[in-house]
Image (cartoon, rainbow, N blue to C red):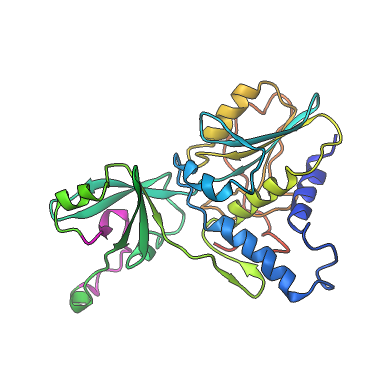
Amino acid sequence: MPTSRTLLAALCLALASRAPHAAAQAPPRADDALADAIARWIALSAPPGGEELAAPALARVLAGWTRDANGNFIRRVGQGTPRRVVACALDLSAYVVSQITDDGYLRLKRTGPALAYPLWDQALESHKVRIHTATGVVPGVVAITNGHFARLHRADSLPATVDQLWVDLGASSRADVEKLGVSMLDPVVPERPVWTYAGMAAGPGAALRAGCAAVATAARGQVASGETVFILSAQHVFNWAGLNAALARLGPVNEVITVGESRGGGRGGCAPAAGRAHPPGAAQHIGRAPPPAPRLRPAGRASD
């Protein structure tokens, strides 16, 4: 059975499978194509509990995968023992509708734990968002403080939090919002473009999504011995709820490796230290994530 270090190295190399030569020999456009592919993973809408929103975009990439009752995407390769699990986190912390005001605005609450970046919520001001309703996507924009009164608040240095965010849908009443199909607890996801630069990919949770790209690519290969179960986990922000449920259904496994996840909001990467290997008997529960790991190569820095 390959060691954890060997398997993680193979996952990293899988991302570079489209470039058969060394990076120094590859034409510049090869890096651009790889960066674009990873950037599209980064831009996926997959809020905790709403991972199915990513299913249409992933349909072609995940041919042969299945979805379980918890929203995990799973592919099993090989059979017998040893049995190993290679997983990544598909979801990213997002928001849900927590209130519809009488004058047609939406208030938000975050799904998942508080992020490590104090300006994260404030950075959403004046940005476009997408509200995923039962009937489709409704566009909106997060309001920003009136600049004409900024001088009155110069002494206030506290960053805005999610409790200060107001989403404008162009509605003027609660009835107008309801006509758009918006309901309480509908997922709200920031609208972010596919962003690449100089052959690199960037965006929130870049290392997490690059890890999933590596897992999806590795799942196309063959297993030399035993069985490998590849999992794109749902609800990882809730202490890996999706992965834990999948492990409970799988029964005994010899090893569990998580790729691309780290402590503190999604930084990490594909390197021997990026995933945590769990020995036999310790694979029934995934606890806290390991410390930040080196960032992904060759697709570029997995910056957040």
Quarter that holds the N terminus: top right
Nearer to us in this view, 106 or 264: 106
Where does residue 304 sit, x and y in percent of width and height? 54, 62
Place residue 159 in its image quadrant: bottom left
Place residue 48 in its image quadrant: top left
Image: magenta residue range: 153-170
Where does residue 54 sit, x and y in percent of width and height? 51, 47
Q: Is residue 93 visible?
A: yes
Q: Is residue 60 left or right of residue 173?
A: right
What residue is at 85 percent from the left and 66 percent from the top?
A: 21
What residue is at 49 percent from the left and 42 percent from the top?
A: 51
Q: Is residue 268 left or right of residue 96?
A: right
Q: Image height check: is 202 above or below 57?
A: below
Nearer to us in this view, 122 or 23: 23
Nearer to us in this view, 175 or 135: 135
What residue is at 49 percent from the left and 41 percent from the top?
A: 52
What residue is at 75 percent from the left and 44 percent from the top?
A: 220
Q: Image height check: is 301 above or below 83?
A: below
Where does residue 98 sit, x and y in percent of width and height? 27, 45
Q: Is residue 300 left or right of residue 72?
A: right
Q: Is residue 41 highlighted in magenta?
A: no
Q: Image height check: is 122 above or below 14?
A: below
State the predominant SS element of the stretch in magenta. Answer: loop
Where does residue 27 sit, x and y in percent of width and height? 78, 74
Q: Is residue 164 highlighted in magenta?
A: yes
